[in-house]
Image (cartoon, rainbow, N blue to C red):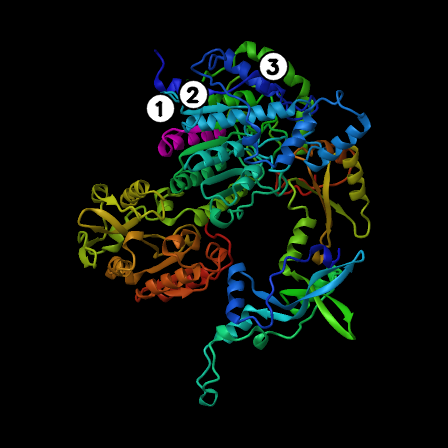
Amino acid sequence: MIVRDIMTTKLVTVEPDDTLGHAAQLLRQHQFHHLPVARTVKQAASQRNAYTMQKTLLFEGVLTAQDLEMAAAPVPHDSSREGLHRPWQEQRVVEVMRPTPMCVTPLTAVGAAAQLLVERGLQYLPVVDYTQSEAETQTILLGLLTRSDLLLAFAHSMGADKPGVDVHIPFTAGNMTPVAQALLLAAELHIYVHRVFAVHPAGGAAHTATIRLGTIHPAPLLARLHEAHIPYTFADPAREDDTYV
Amino acid sequence: MSSTPAQTRARLIFDACELQYDFGHDHPFQARRLAALIDLLESSGLWHSGDERQSWPFRPASMEELSLIHLPEYISAVQQLSMPEENLGDPQQEQAKRAQLAREYGFAEGDTPAIAGMYEVAARIAGGTLVALSTVMGLEEGETGAPEERPLHIFHPAGGLHHAWAERASGFCIYNDIAVAIAHVLRSSEAKVLYIDFDAHHGDGVQRAFYDEPRVMTISLHETGRYLFPGTGDVLELGNGLGRGYSVNLPLAPFTEDDSYIEVMNALLPPLVMSFAPDVIISQHGCDTHAWDPLTHLELTTRSIQAQVRCAHRLAHTYCHGRWVALGGGGYDQFRVVPRVWSMLWAEMSEQALPEQLPEQWIERWRPAWEAVKEQEVLEQELAGKTSFFADFPTTFEDQADHFPPQPRRWSISLENRRMAAMLRQILVPSPIRKVFAAAQRQSPLTDLYDLLHPGGAQGEQSEVFETPKESILLRNFCPPSLVERLTVDSGLHAFARLPEREHQLLVDIARSPDCALTLAHTSAGAIVGEVTLTFGDDWWEGLENIYEVTIEVSSNWRELGLARKLLAFALELETLEDMILFAMGLSWHWDLEGMGITPRRYREMIRQLFSSQGFTEYATTEPNINLEPANILLVRIGKRVDQYVANRFLRRISSSPHLTGL
């Protein structure tokens, strides 16, 4: 999976010259915590020998709700700056926004991006592409990768968005043969498999693969697993001491 | 006319063509169970297909009605897949097209195979439920009988296909008859609809259809989705947007038995129905919760199932003028369970006495059918981990208790269920209603709250006059039930029970409860415009002493007059309250944000200021409900004479681990 597959592309952005009042309005309206700042330029793009005007977002930085709050906080009275003071709503985004933070490209691996988010304590990563135009590098904003995007991708890869049942199959590290056997049996019985998902548990617990089946009636598969002596867990044990069926 | 009105006002909808909804012999969902049901009803004299006073005509749902819920592409895919294969053009191309449709719309996954004629029968079933719901609501086009002759209760055993989604078939369900019927009522009337799902599987299709709709409350009691299809139905799936708080899910532990089931059902359903104030109840009675069912892990018997039906019946009469539609649903022990429990449902609905024994001829006819699938059924139960086998055919309507040995983990399972129900009650049921429908016995068996607050003996109720620019308001504490009964409720007072009449009944019940102290503000004409209740802290606070919860509500017609502040000060004037810890929980989903026209943050600030005028301060806490929303707030006042040890225990509790303790 790469960033392009899961990033948010429907962006709400502000221009560097927009007022903070406008930005605050957007943040409140969409309940966002951060807004990418970008200049919208129309560039001629050639497509099949016909020139069309294409909108491009040139990435400038990010405005966070925190930046806004700092700007909105009352400043101690300073007589030397008398007359310069303007209400925060009238200040420009470019005055308070952060310079370009860390970015990723659409081809970055999702795992690497996730690692980056956690290690640096970030809430989001701008997804950009670099182009050369008139001897100058332009940073084009393509999307945003937020923690929510990652969580959703995680939930989807577990199959949580599809109705079905989970069967857990334990396996020894490095050898997923029981999982493969179970999948073969499912295919034989025409049972739809939504996802297979294996976790690498911390603390040396048993490795488990979760097979999400798109069926309300897994009994035929369970019967075959039982026959083939493939261990599995399905439902809580009836007794305290039962672990695997 | 020898029959009572109640008897003639219950109907059962069935048509032989509904037996076409059948996925074939090797499939768990077969129409034979319905045939067995109808045979049992007829042979035990509970229902006769020819009797017009017991049945009701119905029609298929139209394309337009189906499209209230389903996407037009899906409906036409069902139509195409429903046509017999032979009489169509190029077979190979046709087959590829069909396979493509089946993959796209959920027919390729094995559970819900495409069958010939399925469009007609699925539309027919959807029509049955739609006609049933419209009829009890008095909406049906043609049949406009006098209101007092209209059927009040209708049972549609072929309905209840709760898994179908807007764009795909799922879990044996093609069209979601329930959602279609509810959507039809929503657009043709102002009614609010309560849907109760007793099936062992989560009612995901219906919940999805109305997840953001505050006029439909969906309540589903099901086995947890940890392992069972469809995997959803977590307790925190509460609804979205305006519909927040109107989707209710009680996931039960596998191997749940009767006592635990009945306990949590009674703890949850009545207060929720009271607070929602629906106009009609539609309930799905999937009986795959039964201990013999091969597809699930629940261990119920007919005792719980009887309790479900009675509960729905009673709630319909108490809150909905009797308007009630019951549907079938899951149930995969086709011969031993389905016919018996749905006959019980019909007997309860039509108020007929249920015979004890199953008719001999019926057993003779259906026992061989069961013998043929017996081995398979036992194997599947075994695979599901069930232990309560009873390898024989029942001879009575009700289950015999000794056929169901107790489950080894009964205690921990009931504990888990009880915690789940307590959490839902905390989240969804406003505190005053919770007190009226107390889950456990009261805390102080010897004295009631009045005596506790007046250690020096009775001093009688106090009253005071508060002058407002509008008119003068009387404040009274410890209002007795007789006083509350004589008063009326202002139209703007509805935060807890949503309708002024219900709010009135609720206040009377609170006044009756020995565990509650009720302070009221009313006009000289006797309209209640504000209330403060003082009650024992329950559930999460269990085990702590001297801890009381305060709730306050002021009618939306009487705001911004300083009434709330005055009323709160008056209610908390008692000297004995200095010996106690008082707390108030601000839960944003109970706030009248619309009426006030302000944001949750501002509302929170308003509440904080109101309570801080009485010496309350805000505390950070790990209490699960407060933690659900950042806007929620816990306000506490520790009385001056509270023992340091008690106060410390309280402070430890509010920041303890976020599990419900002391249950």
**Segment tinted magenta in the rendering:** B303-324
Residue B371 picture location, percent across and down:
66, 17
User: Tag 3: Cα neighbours inside 10 Å, few (<14), some, or many (≥20)?
Assistant: some
Q: Cα distance, mark 2 to mark 1? A: 11 Å
Q: Main secondary structure of the magenta part?
A: helix
Marks 3/2 in contact by CB < 8 Å: the verdict is: no
Query: Who is closer to the viewer here, B549 or A131?
Result: A131
Q: Earlier in the sequence, mark 3 or mark 2?
A: 2
Query: Who is closer to the viewer here, A108 or B72?
Result: B72
Q: Nearer the viewer, mark 3 or mark 2?
A: 2
Q: Cα distance, mark 3 to mark 2? A: 37 Å
Q: Nearer the viewer, mark 3 or mark 1?
A: 1
Left or right: where does residue B425 sit relative to residue B236?
left
What's the chain of the residue with tag 1? B
Residue A67 picture location, percent across and down:
55, 73
Marks 2/1 in contact by CB < 8 Å: the verdict is: no
State which quadrant residue B366 falls in: top right
Q: Which mark is residue B366?
A: 3
